[in-house]
Image (cartoon, rainbow, N blue to C red):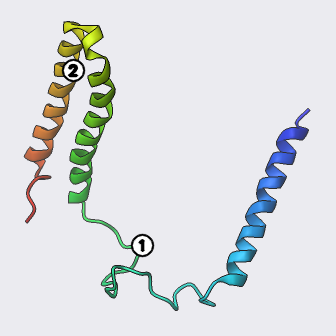
Amino acid sequence: MYSGVVVLVAGTLGLVAVLYTLQRVLSDASTPLTSLPFQSGWIPREHALSRFHARWYLVTVVFLAFDVEMLFMYPWALVVGGLGATAVVEMFLFLGALFVAVVWARREGALRWV
């Protein structure tokens, strides 16, 4: 009954094992921390798994606000002529909601770069 799922899981685990083994055999470094990651030619000043400052959360909110805006505005721009005034009103409501998000982020200090 579940033979397809079992074959899929077994195949996936087998593929992961093969790829992991190939990586271990073909990699340059014998231990992961002996070679530094490439960071535009600079030696890293902090560990790769270090924590980020909380202000980056607000920067991410601002980025997502503008990213999602463009994600929805492009298809809207293609069909707005056929939809009429209702589509324009809905887009202004959407932009108003994004504006509220940007105002909140500014109030929280996301746009302050000091």
Q: What is the x, y in percent for residue 30?
A: 63, 90
Residue at the location (78% across, 58% down)?
A: 13
Total labels: the figure holds 2
Left or right side of 1 for 83 = left
Residue at the location (41% across, 76% down)?
A: 48
Q: Quadrant of residue 46?
A: bottom left
State the SS at label 2.
helix
Dot 1 alpha-carbon crowd within 10 angstroms: few under 14, some 14 to 19, many 20 or more: few
Left or right side of 113 for 45 = right
Residue at the location (34% across, 85% down)?
A: 41
At label 1, the amino acid type is Leu
Compared with residue 57, is residue 43 higher up or lower down, i.e. above or below? below
Q: Which disc is residue 49 wearing?
A: 1
Q: Mark 2 vs mark 1: which is more N-terminal?
A: 1
At label 2, the amino acid type is Met
Residue at the location (86% across, 45% down)?
A: 6
Residue 57 vs residue 10, the one in the foreground: 10
Q: What is the x, y in percent for residue 91?
A: 21, 20
Q: In the image, which is nearer the foreground, mark 2 or mark 1? A: 2
State the SS at label 1.
loop
Residue named by callout 2: 91
Q: Quadrant of residue 70?
A: top left
Left or right side of 52 for 28 = right
Compared with residue 41, is residue 22 higher up or lower down, i.e. above or below? above
Q: What is the x, y in percent for residue 114?
A: 7, 66
Left or right side of 14 for 49 = left
Q: What is the x, y in percent for residue 20?
A: 71, 71
